[in-house]
Amino acid sequence: DGGITQSPKYLFRKEGQNVTLSCEQNLNHDAMYWYRQDPGQGLRLIYYSQIVNDFQKGDIAEGYSVSREKKESFPLTVTSAQKNPTAFYLCASSVTGSRINQPQHFGDGTRLSIL
Amino acid sequence: GENVEQHPSTLSVQEGDSAVIKCTYSDSASNYFPWYKQELGKRPQLIIDIRSNVGEKKDQRIAVTLNKTAKHFSLHITETQPEDSAVYFCAGQTGANNLFFGTGTRLTVIP
C-alpha cells in the first residue's frame, strides 16, 4: 500500500552498532506493527502499538526497541543486543487494534544485513 | 496463544490447473483469517479474508473456505497463471488480538 513508507530499503549494521528503521503511514491508522521475516519462516511480531505513546512487546522483542510519539510514525531500533539481526523487516498498520477483524497493510520492507 | 500451521511449504502446478493451500489453527476463539501474497522482495498484500460467521468467500479465481469444527481453512486458486507464482501466507486472529501467521507456501505456476 502506498500509504506505508519504510526506509531505508537496505541497511547495513556494524558490530556493536544500533540502527533505526523508519516506518511512516499517512492512512490515519491507529495501530502499527513491526515484523521480522527470515527465509522459510512466517512473519514474527516484534512490537506493536495500538495508540500513540503506547506500545507492547511481541513474540521476539529482545534486542529491539520502539517509540510511538506520533500517530504516523513507528520507528524500530535494532540494538547491539540483537545478535542475529540479519532479516527482512516489515512494518504494518491497521485502522485500529482495538476493534476486531481489521486487516493489516504492509510497507515494502527493509533488508538489514551485518557488515 | 494461537498457533497456525500451513501446508504444503512448496507447491508446483501447471498453468491452468488449480492450487490449494491449507492452514490449521489451534484457538477455537479465532474469528478472522486473512491470506497474503508476497512476491520476491516485496510487501505481503492482502488477497482475501474470511470471518468466522462465513463458510466460504470467493473473489474471481480465488476462494477461501473455513471449517470451524475442524479448525482449518484453505485457499483455492483456479485457472492458475504464471503471475500467481509467489509465497502465500495464511493468518489467524482472535478478537482484537494480533495476527498469527503460518510459515508460508511457495507456489510456482509452470507455463
Image: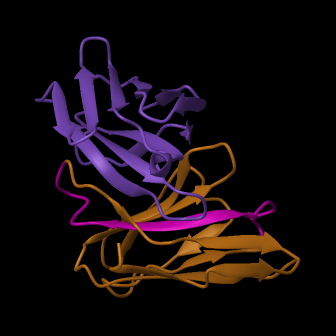
Chain colours: A orange, B purple
Locate residue A14 relative to residue B11 in the image: left or right: right
Q: In this view, does B68 lie to the left or right of B1?
A: left
Viewer-proximal residue among A41 and B41: B41
Q: How many numbered marks, from 0 up?
A: 0
Where is B10 relative to B95, above or below? above
- Location of the N terminus of chain B by quadrant is top left
Residue at point 25% right, 72% down? A30
Report the magenta residues as a range: A81-100
Q: Where is residue A107 in the image (x, y as percent from the top left)?
A: 45, 71
For residue B70, side relative to residue B7 (left or right): left
Quarter of the image with the C terminus of chain B in it: top right
User: Quick one: which residue is furthest to the top in this view?
Assistant: B70
> Residue at position x 77%, y 67% from top?
A81
> Observer-nearest residue: B91 or A69?
B91
- Out of B9 and B92, give the one closest to the viewer: B9
Q: Where is residue A39 in the image (x, y as percent from the top left)?
A: 69, 49
Above or below, A29 relative to B37: below
Residue B47 x %, y %: 32, 50
* Magenta stretch, overall SS: loop
- Residue B104 visible in the current orientation: no
Q: Which residue is drawn at 85% across and 78% down?
A: A16
Image side of residue B96 versus residue A49, left or right: left
Q: Which residue is drawn at 49% across and 62% down?
A: A47
Residue B46 visible in the current orientation:
yes
Where does residue B84 sit, x and y in percent of width and height? Answer: 45, 47
Identity of the residue furthest to the left in this view: B53
Q: Does the magenta stretch include residue B102?
A: no
Q: Is residue A81 above or below residue B45?
A: below
Quadrant in which residue A65 is drawn: bottom right
